[in-house]
Image (cartoon, helix red, strand yellow):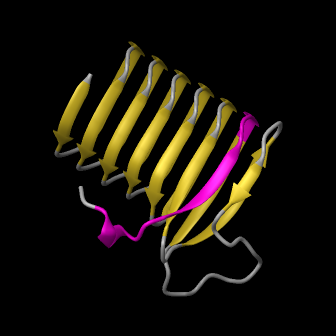
Amino acid sequence: MEVDEISGDATAKAASGDLSLASVGGAANINTASGDVKLGHVAGDVVVKAASGDVTVGDARGDATISTASGDQRIEAVTAGKVDLKAMSGDIKIGIRQGSNVWVDARAMSGELSSEVALGDEPPAEDAPLVELRAASMSGDIEVVRAPAASTLTH
């Protein structure tokens, strides 16, 4: 199923099949057994539970909670908020916007951890947005990358 724009909140449950929502004006709550989930711009919180299939979020403006049993997870850009990503089998990739600080608690049982974003013990700049990232994968890599600043992207 493909939908271009939803002005408010979006809730979807599916047994199988792909789901694509280009723009959600509120929160997105998705639950699927089998199939890929692709969300473009989401203005509110994102909650996705998928048994099998990849999950992609283009621009998460609120908190994000994604859990998959089998499938890759990708958030292309997040500016601030709490991000909780869990995968049994699959890679996790998240883009932190330029100008945002990140606090990370990440674990990969049989995968690699990598970050383009400087991770250290120094306190974040007081005026910068903060992303609190918790990521865990039993079998897969976790990658933190730098996403472009929000003003350089179009919706």
The quadrant in which the N terminus is found is top left
| Residue 68, image quadrant | top right
131 to the left or right of 149: right
Q: Residue at x 41, y 30 (%)?
A: 37
Residue lying furthest top: 15
Q: Residue at x 52, y 43 (%)?
A: 74
Q: Position of residue 5 (x, y in %)?
A: 18, 41
82 to the left or right of 61: right
Q: Looking at the image, is 18 positioned above or below residue 121?
A: above
Question: Within the magenta stretch, is there residue 151?
Answer: yes
Q: Position of residue 40 (x, y in %)?
A: 32, 45
Picture mark count: 0
Q: Position of residue 28 (x, y in %)?
A: 35, 40
Q: Position of residue 132 (x, y in %)?
A: 60, 62
Q: Residue at x 48, y 77 (%)?
A: 99
The quadrant in which the C terminus is found is bottom left
Q: Looking at the image, is 56 positioned above or below residue 115?
A: above
The one nearer the camera, 11 or 145, is: 145
116 to the left or right of 52: right
Residue lying furthest right: 110
Q: Looking at the image, is 21 positioned above or below residue 120?
A: above
Question: Within the magenta stretch, is there residue 53?
Answer: no
Q: Residue at x 38, y 58 (%)?
A: 61
Residues drawn in magenta: 137-153
Q: Is residue 91 visible?
A: yes
Q: Is residue 9 visible?
A: no
